[in-house]
Amino acid sequence: MIRPLTVPLAFLLAAGAVSIAHAEPGIDAARAQDIARQHACFGCHAVDKKLVGPAYRDVAARYADQPGAAATLVAHVRNGTSGAWGAVPMPPNQISAADAQTVVQWILAGSKTN
């Protein structure tokens, strides 16, 4: 008897086994941008130009086709990072994993604006 695979998608994403570096239908750009605004992400990042941190489109380009990109970026958003884009560190953000995932999916899909 063949048993169906029952590994939850959230586990696969967290483990880096599934990459969502390409645009996926169903990404709610408006919601992702609202979350980014609520967490002051646009204070350091812009969609198409470097501010304090890299442009979201530059992030998408760097992580395109990289396995585990979404999980890596969610960890960067939630835990902070340093040295990934230069000398200025990114501080940790008080954001839920689900909200971070929404923003990261939007970034990796090209940061389309409404």
Image: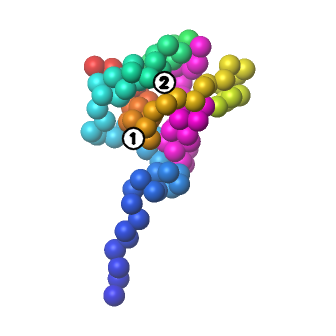
Q: In the rendered view, would you say 1 is above or below 113?
A: below
Q: Amino acid at mark 1?
A: Ala
In the image: residue 88, left or right of residue 57: right
Which residue is tagged 1? 98
State the CA–CA distance, disc 2 to disc 1: 21 Å
Residue 83 picture quarter: top right
Q: Nearer the viewer, mark 2 or mark 1?
A: 1
- Of callouts 2 and 1, the N-terminal one: 2
Residue 26: x %, y % from top left: 27, 39
Residue 4 picture quarter: bottom left
How many discs appear?
2
Residue 33: x %, y % from top left: 36, 23
Local crowd size for mark 1, using a 10 Å CA cut-off: few (<14), some (14–19), many (≥20): few
Viewport quadrant of the N terminus:
bottom left
Residue under the image location 31 percent in, 36 percent down = 27
Question: For residue 57, which numbered disc appears in the image?
Answer: 2
Q: Amino acid at mark 2?
A: Arg
Residue under the image location 28 percent in, 40 percent down = 25
Which residue range is magenta in the image?
Answer: 52-80
Residue 60 lies in magenta, yes or no? Answer: yes
Secondary structure of residue under mark 2? helix
